[in-house]
Image (spheres, rainbow, N blue to C red):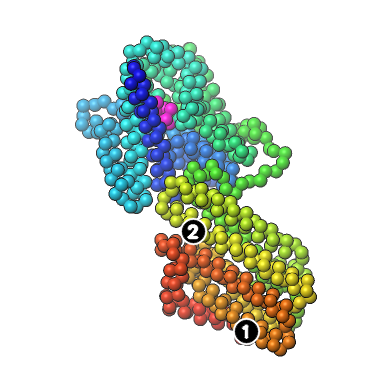
Amino acid sequence: MDIFDVLTLIGGLSLFLFGMNIMGQALERRAGGNLRLLLSRLTTNKAAGLLTGLGVTAVIQSSSATTVMVVGFVNSGLMTLKQAINVIMGANIGTTVTAWVLSLAGIESGNIFVSLLKPSSFTPVLALLGIIFYMFCRNDKKKDTGMILLGFATLMFGMETMSGAVSGLRSVPWFQSLFILFKNPVLGVLAGAILTAIIQSSSASVGILQALAVTGRVSYGAAIPIIMGQNIGTCVTAMISSVGANKNAKRAAMVHLSFNVIGTVVYLAAFCLIKAFFGLPFLDEYASLFGIAVAHSVFNVLCTILMLPLSGFLEKLVNRLVPDAKQPEIRPELDERLLSTPAIALERCYKVTADMARIAVSALKESAAWLLNNDSIHKQGSIRENIPENHFKNVRGNIPESNRKNVGENIPENIREKEEKTDYYEDILGTYLVKLSAKQISGADSTEAAKLLKMIGDFERISDHAVNILESGEEMKEKGLQFTDDAVFELQVIIGAINEILDLSLTAFLSDDLEAASGVEPLEQVIDRLKEQMRTRHIFRMQQGLCSIDMGFIWSDLLTNLERTADHCSNIAGCVIDMAHHNMNIHESLRNVRNDSRDFQQKYKEYTSKYSFERS
């Protein structure tokens, strides 16, 4: 083996690792929706968690990536430690798929149909199909399919290049001595662990071992301990990813390490005892690519059979190894570890945005209810009897009955806390979504990320308007100003409409409900009309000496904040409609809603009748 063989080996290894990496990323993008579906079906059931880990790892071809994903899930609260244990066990079995695919290179047969199963036979065809899909298709899914095929072809070409480069080692004495040395089980385990820790992939490490097996000098006695060590080395990635995570995420990484260390120790001891007392002739036989794949799978299945009934013990063990912190932990809302799996990261962004949306809507509703229930800024005499019951229910139900007569100071404080939280959510979501958009994600996920970026601004502004409304009421208290009965009635009508438009836009966002979204724009137009009517009616009251100039300024601010809240609801509904029609032009979507005159006019008429200043 000369310097040129070494360079060829390095090139083959580089292509092998690169092909595995790009194939895994493309598979992950292509299966993004399915990954979310698998995650949503996770339960505490052992079999479900095991199959989930196996399935995800078989798709993305890396138990390290799956475990890092699991650490991120646990850190973000998406998964419990008990669920994580079962998924990690499944991941260890799923990672053996790669070895089986690579073992196809060892097929030897004169039969043309059997020979077609060899990667060297079908890889060129896959590469051709891959480049056609990637270069000539505009559909993102087809491009990802092309990248998967190209990645697999690159991986297999790298494998063949490595095998060719090391084939000359079969006659080199030091190489033979090296694998005789690895027949010492402890040294074999150390060698496998160190190699895998360096390249951070047990699948790639097994692939390298299979490439070396082509020399015909790697015995089963040396290969089996190396495979055991590879399972320990792959834990390094998860351990690194757990740095800076919360205690449960650290425990999830420790589960991965403990599972593999315990399994390796138990079966290494059994391997040594059987070898010493019974002597196994096949251990001196030279390993084939197929044999290494079998050994890899059998070892991981045996480890799972051993540890699956002991998952409760494993949970207690890692709880002792990573004890509870003295100070309570603050769970991060978004974990950057999830960026390695964009489909799951986007799902987490959606859930955090949903939390933000609920907080913003509740803040606005509470602020409006506080304004109407605070006896110090208006007199609620006989006005209730003159208000239609549907208006009264729409605006009074946002503060507990016990607090309605005397609105306590805790409600303004709660509204301000909610506004601060939405500010925080906007900051972390905006930063996270920008980072996510920089990743190689599918077109659909990119559009979803853009939609969320648009919406978080609207939800944050709604919470700002909640504080503005609160401050207007507090200014009235400080100046000793009060609403007239007519003003209270008008506020109750428009706030009833505001509450309904908030509910419609929130439902549209949370459920992608186009029916709810289509009802927002006509109601927003009704609210605009109510605002103008309220301005005019207030001017008449000032002309009659019923209201002061100071009250006029506050009234104007209140109407502006309520009307702009409706505008933000319109933006949110427009985004939902955009997504449904694969169009990101919100102005065009809103125009189309208005131009659908029959439906729009019917709803506009209904809302006009429902929210009017005509007392029944």
Question: Which of the two marks, 1 or 2, is nearer to us in this view?
Answer: 1
Local packing at callout 1 (Cα closer than 10 Å; few below 14, some 14-19, many 20+) is few
Residue in the foreground of this view, choosing between 534 and 602: 534
**Local secondary structure at mark 1:** helix
Which label number is shown at residue 231? none
Up-down: is 414 above or below 346?
below
Outermost residue toward the bottom in this view:
544
Residue in the foreground of this view, choosing between 23 and 436: 436
| Callout 1 amino acid | Thr
**Could you tell whether 150 is left or right of 455 in the image?**
left
Residue at (43, 31) in percent of width and height: 203
| Callout 2 amino acid | Lys
Do callouts 1 and 2 mark residues in contact (Cβ within 8 Å)? no
Q: Quadrant of the C terminus?
A: bottom right
Which label number is shown at residue 536? 1
From where the camera sits, is residue 416 visible? Answer: yes
